Amino acid sequence: MIQEELQKLEKLARQASLRISELSAENQLLKEKLGQAESQLSQREQEIENFKNKIKITNIVDNRTVNPEDSAEMSELINNYIKEIDHLIDYLSE
């Protein structure tokens, strides 16, 4: 009777040990994924800051008089920046 109980306890201990190992591996994997996600988030935040700076520069340029020839080019650049910003906003909203 005691022998059977000891065997059951040993079996439970082995199962618990195996489960702990599995959970430790899963925990490590989740930590790595979290680190990657944080890194990507940081990168996206930096890209947004860069676009904000470009917008500020664009606003400064808009206040300056521009040759008509340069105006079309400047307008195209601004439109491209706006499209990139919209794309980033859509990406971050996902």
Image (tube, rainbow, N blue to C red):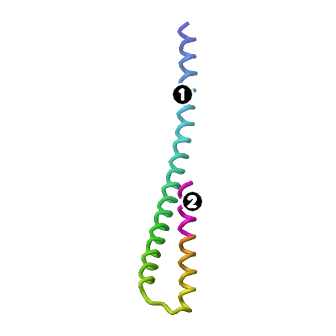
Does residue 52 belong to the magenta stretch? no
The location of residue 38, given as percent across then percent down, is: 48, 55
84 or 44, which lies in front?
84
Q: CA distance from mark 1 to mark 2?
A: 42 Å
Residue at which label 1 appears: 16
Which SS does the magenta portion mostly show? helix
Residue name at image x 52 percent, y 45 percent: 28
The quadrant of the image that shows the N terminus is top right
Magenta residue check for 91: yes
- Magenta range is 84-94
Image point (57%, 86%), residue name: 72
Residue 90 position, x and y percent, is 56, 60
Disc 1 element:
helix
Q: Amino acid at mark 2?
A: Tyr
| Residue 91 numbered mark, or none | 2
Q: Residue at x 53, y 58 (%)?
A: 92
Q: Is residue 7 above or below residue 21?
A: above
